[in-house]
């Protein structure tokens, strides 16, 4: 049996909701508008436009932030003595700064510890790098080539992740082997 108080269709349900809203008692002086009222929709649209306008206008433009400092600068020393103090090592990455995840080379110059201008010819110079904080080295093995006059080029270096790298230059001259270590930040 059909109960006249129960709606059967979607339009009857929405009419019932509108009627219930209209029956609510509004405070004195106010009228309750139905949700489909053109006045209510116009007010909502106006409020939306005012909100957008308020957000899009500013009294003064926001100043641009300065760029962050470069983290891939070399440590202050691209020159230093080997651990035994016999040799002075000067180095420069090519390109400078060394890129992340791309092959690069390092130019190395070996001089005597006391005289920076006199090249020191040695038997071998090996260049390698690692991340002491992570306990690993590079994924490549650089090849060092003598260029003459105490200058060497190490090709095939690859910093495969950002962070603090340690460049290691090992110098061998006769029975003497000494090492110089340099910090390089890469981002």
Image: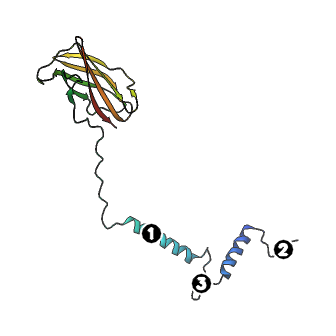
Mark 2 to mark 3: distance in Å? 31 Å
**Could you say where residue 11 lies in the image, as x and y percent from the top left?**
71, 70
Q: Earlier in the sequence, mark 2 or mark 3?
A: 2
Q: Earlier in the sequence, mark 3 or mark 1?
A: 3
Q: Mark 3 points at which residue?
A: 31
Location of residue 3 (image quadrant): bottom right
Location of residue 80 (image quadrant): top left
Mark 3 to mark 1: distance in Å? 25 Å
Q: Circle 1 sits in a helix, a strand or a loop, which is it?
A: helix
Residue placed most toward the observer, 111 or 101: 111
Q: Circle 2 sits in a helix, a strand or a loop, which is it?
A: loop
Residue 167, compared with residue 17, is above or below; it is: above
In this view, the residue farthest toward the bottom is: 28
Mark 1 to mark 2: distance in Å? 47 Å
Q: Residue at x 35, y 33 (%)?
A: 100
Q: Which of marks 1 and 2 is nearer the N terminus?
A: 2
The 10 Å Cα crowd at callout 3, few under 14, some 14 to 19, many 20 or more, is few
* Labelled disc at residue 122: none
Q: Mark 1 points at which residue?
A: 51
In this view, the residue farthest toward the front is: 84
Q: Residue at x 85, y 72 (%)?
A: 2
Residue 56, compared with residue 173, is above or below; it is: below
In this view, the residue farthest toward the right is: 1
Q: Do callouts 3 and 1 mark residues in contact (Cβ within 8 Å)?
A: no
* Labelled disc at residue 3: 2
In this view, the residue farthest toward the top is: 174
């Amino acid at each position: 049996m059909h109960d006249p108080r129960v709606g059967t269709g979607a339009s009857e349900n929405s009419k019932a909701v509108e009627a219930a809203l209209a029956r609510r008692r509004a405070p004195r002086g106010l009228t309750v508008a139905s949700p489909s009222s053109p006045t209510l929709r116009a007010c909502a649209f106006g409020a939306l436009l005012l909100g957008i306008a308020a957000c899009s206008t500013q009294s003064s433009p926001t100043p641009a932030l300065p760029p962050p400092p470069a983290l891939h600068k070399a440590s202050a020393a691209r020159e230093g003595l080997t651990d035994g103090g016999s040799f002075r090592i000067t180095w420069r990455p090519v390109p400078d700064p060394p890129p992340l995840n791309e092959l690069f080379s390092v130019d190395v110059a070996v001089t005597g510890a006391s005289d920076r201008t006199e090249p020191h010819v040695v038997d071998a110079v090996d260049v390698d790098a690692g991340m002491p904080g992570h306990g690993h080295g590079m994924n490549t093995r650089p090849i060092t080539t003598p260029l003459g006059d105490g200058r060497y080029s190490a090709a095939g270096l690859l910093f495969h992740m950002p962070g603090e790298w340690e460049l290691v230059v090992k110098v061998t001259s006769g029975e003497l082997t000494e090492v110089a270590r340099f910090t390089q930040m890469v981002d």
